[in-house]
Image (cartoon, helix red, strand yellow):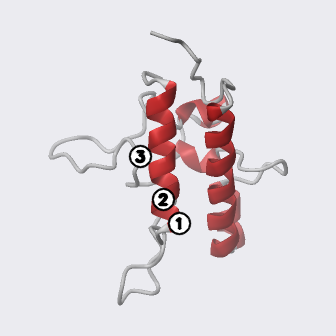
């Protein structure tokens, strides 16, 4: 992953702000539409729609280091990030159909990950290198 810790913290904080601002809510007038978690959001490498750019996930994604290696080639690998001690993932929580719990668990995972990064832990494959 080619980013430094302060950039990663800002990006994850932007994702957290997005969620807390209702970013995963259904679009106005379309209550049946659910926005995929992490997809085309501030932390997504495909956030900006670029003409002729293939929308696939790859190693430049800031979340890829949190994805277990066996799931990195999956469609939406970020949906396989363990979010809590029970090992729940976006994919498993979506399968249960509990959108509120899904958003709560993603929010808590982001808060915890941001805090751990600020405390100097090497999470998501980012070391605390000083330049």
In terms of depth relative to the viewer, which is nearer, 121 or 26?
Answer: 121
Q: CA distance from mark 3 to mark 1?
A: 17 Å
Mark 2 highlights which residue? 17
Direction bottom: furthest residue:
29
In the image, residue 59 above or below residue 128? below
User: How far across and down, in percent of the image, does residue 37 sit?
Assistant: 52, 59
- The mark lying in front, picked from 3 and 1, is 1
Measure the C-alpha gap from mark 1 to mark 2. 5 Å
- Where's residue 71, x and y in %? 62, 37
Q: Residue at x 70, y 59 (%)?
A: 92
Between disc 3 and disc 1, whose residue precedes?
1
Residue to which mark 1 is pinned: 20
Q: Residues within 10 Å of mark 2 (few under 14, many from 20)?
A: some
Mark 2 or mark 3, whichever is nearer to me: 2
Of mark 2 and mark 3, the one earlier in the sequence is: 2
Identify the residue at horizontal 65%, vertical 44% (top origin): 81
Q: Which residue is mark 3?
A: 44
């Amino acid at each position: 992953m080619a980013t430094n810790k302060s950039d990663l913290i800002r990006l994850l904080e932007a994702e957290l702000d997005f969620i807390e601002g209702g970013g995963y809510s259904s679009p106005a007038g379309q209550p049946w539409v659910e926005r995929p978690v992490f997809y085309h959001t501030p932390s997504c490498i495909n956030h900006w729609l670029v003409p002729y750019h293939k929308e696939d996930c790859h190693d430049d994604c800031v979340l890829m280091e949190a994805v277990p290696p066996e799931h990195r080639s999956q469609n939406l690998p970020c949906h396989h990030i363990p979010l809590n001690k029970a090992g729940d993932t976006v994919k498993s929580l979506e399968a249960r159909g509990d959108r509120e719990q899904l958003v709560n668990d993603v929010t808590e995972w982001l808060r915890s990950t941001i805090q751990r990064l600020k405390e100097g832990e090497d999470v998501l494959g980012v070391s605390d290198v000083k330049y």
